[in-house]
């Protein structure tokens, strides 16, 4: 389902938290820019907050690129089997075909922006 494409200004509070498939333990996201929210065709833009020990399972995108921008907290980003601690102001780029996951291993919530393009992986 998509909505009419038109400019929009919305506050993040207006979008409910969701736990998407493959996300566990309080790995919550707000889908701010998607086909069903603003009618976007190319970009999926989310803010995510992972509670302590929350994670997304390791996965690979066929054609999608992703950018993670950590806003608060600390976690572990695993990229092709290599684990790296990520924290505030880290920006991570994941090209297609790269296995990756993120997990909150810190003492507080891990909050980050995720930008994915294109919206569908095939």
Image: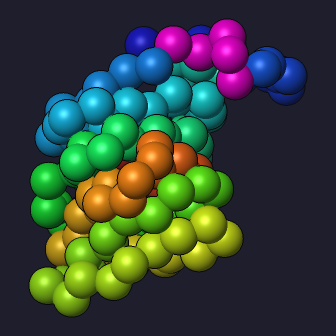
Q: Which of the pair 106/120 is nearer the observer?
A: 106
Q: Which of the pair 7/91 is nearer the observer?
A: 91
Q: Which of the pair 120/60 is nearer the observer?
A: 60
Q: Is residue 115 left or right of residue 89?
A: left
Q: Quadrant of residue 90?
A: bottom right
Residue 118, percent from left and from top: 47, 53
Residue 8, percent from left and from top: 83, 22
Q: Residue at x 78, y 20 (%)?
A: 11
Compared with 75, 120 (above or below) is: above
Magenta stretch: dominant SS? helix
Image coloring type: rainbow
Compared with 105, 77 (above or below) is: below
Q: Is residue 94 left or right of residue 73?
A: left
Q: How many marks?
A: 0
Q: Which residues are magenta?
A: 12-16
Q: Quadrant of the N terminus?
A: top left
């Amino acid at each position: 389902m998509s909505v009419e494409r038109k400019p929009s200004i919305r506050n993040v509070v207006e979008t409910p938290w969701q736990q998407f498939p493959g996300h566990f333990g309080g790995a919550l996201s707000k889908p701010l820019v998607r086909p069903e929210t603003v009618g976007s065709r190319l970009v999926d833009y989310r803010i995510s907050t992972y509670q302590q020990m929350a994670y997304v399972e390791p996965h690979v995108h066929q054609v999608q690129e992703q950018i993670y921008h950590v806003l608060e907290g600390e976690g572990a980003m695993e990229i092709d089997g290599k684990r790296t601690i990520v924290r505030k102001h880290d920006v991570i780029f994941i090209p297609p075909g790269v296995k990756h996951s993120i997990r909150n291993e810190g003492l507080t919530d891990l909050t980050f922006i995720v930008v994915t393009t294109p919206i569908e992986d095939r």
